[in-house]
Image: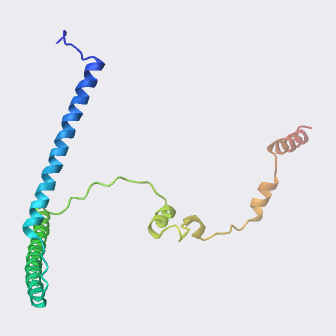
């Protein structure tokens, strides 16, 4: 395999052109066969028409053609009926196959983190906007501010308190 010869570009081109010529000849032969089969079928089903000159012969020819049309329509109707029956049977068998397999197993769904707003928007569509802000729906409770709390707040900076207390200490020392 190591001593495998490669084809030259010229050789590849000639082989390719030869293959195309052979394929073209085969396609032409196949087309000729189809054309001859078509002509043979048409000659069998539709014989050449020789029109008679008398009225009686024309009426006879019309009756004959109507009979042939009736026969072909009956054949077409029978074939369509059989086809519909087979299609219905196939449909019924497919339904039976699905029933015999059992119930459809549901795939495991992935957990999706979604807010209530996004979920409602997905369910109801983008036109309906429902706001589910739960904190906004809670009752607001107002605190009663006691006077003691006000005094504690008014005390202010803790350093001032210390300075005030240090003054008191000086009073006791003197």
Is residue 45 shown left or right of residue 165? left
Tally of numbered discs = 0
Residue 86 versus residue 139: which sits nearer the camera?
Answer: 86
Quadrant for the N terminus in the image: top left
Residue 159 versus residue 52: which sits nearer the camera?
Answer: 52
Quadrant for the C terminus in the image: top right
Residue 110 drawn at (x, y percent): 35, 52
Residue 102 drawn at (x, y percent): 13, 62
Image-quadrant location for residue 63 = bottom left
Q: Is residue 109 above or below residue 46?
A: above
Q: Is residue 15 above or below residue 30?
A: above
Residue drawn 21% across the image and 32% down it: 19
Is residue 71 shown left or right of residue 125? left
Q: Please, which residue is most extreme toward the front here?
A: 53
Q: How is the image coloured?
A: rainbow
Is residue 50 shown left or right of residue 129? left
Is residue 146 shown left or right of residue 117? right
Residue drawn 22% across the image and 25% down it: 15
Residue 14 drawn at (x, y percent): 25, 24
Image-quadrant location for residue 67 = bottom left
Residue 39 drawn at (x, y percent): 13, 60
Residue 16 versus residue 61: which sits nearer the camera?
Answer: 61
């Amino acid at each position: 395999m190591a001593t495998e010869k490669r084809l030259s570009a010229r050789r590849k081109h000639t082989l390719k052109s030869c293959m195309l010529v052979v394929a073209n000849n085969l396609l032409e032969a196949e087309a000729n066969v189809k054309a001859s089969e078509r002509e043979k079928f048409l000659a069998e089903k539709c014989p050449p028409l020789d029109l008679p000159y008398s009225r009686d012969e024309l009426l006879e020819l019309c009756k004959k053609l109507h009979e042939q049309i009736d026969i072909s329509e009956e054949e077409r109707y029978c074939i369509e009926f059989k086809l519909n029956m087979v299609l219905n049977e196939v449909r019924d068998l497919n339904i039976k196959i699905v029933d015999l397999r059992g119930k459809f197993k549901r795939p495991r769904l992935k957990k999706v983190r979604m807010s209530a707003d996004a979920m409602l928007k997905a369910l109801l569509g983008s036109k309906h906007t429902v706001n589910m802000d739960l904190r906004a729906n809670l009752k607001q409770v107002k605190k009663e501010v006691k006077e003691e709390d006000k005094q504690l707040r008014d005390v202010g900076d803790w350093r001032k308190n210390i300075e005030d207390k240090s003054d008191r200490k000086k009073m006791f020392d003197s």
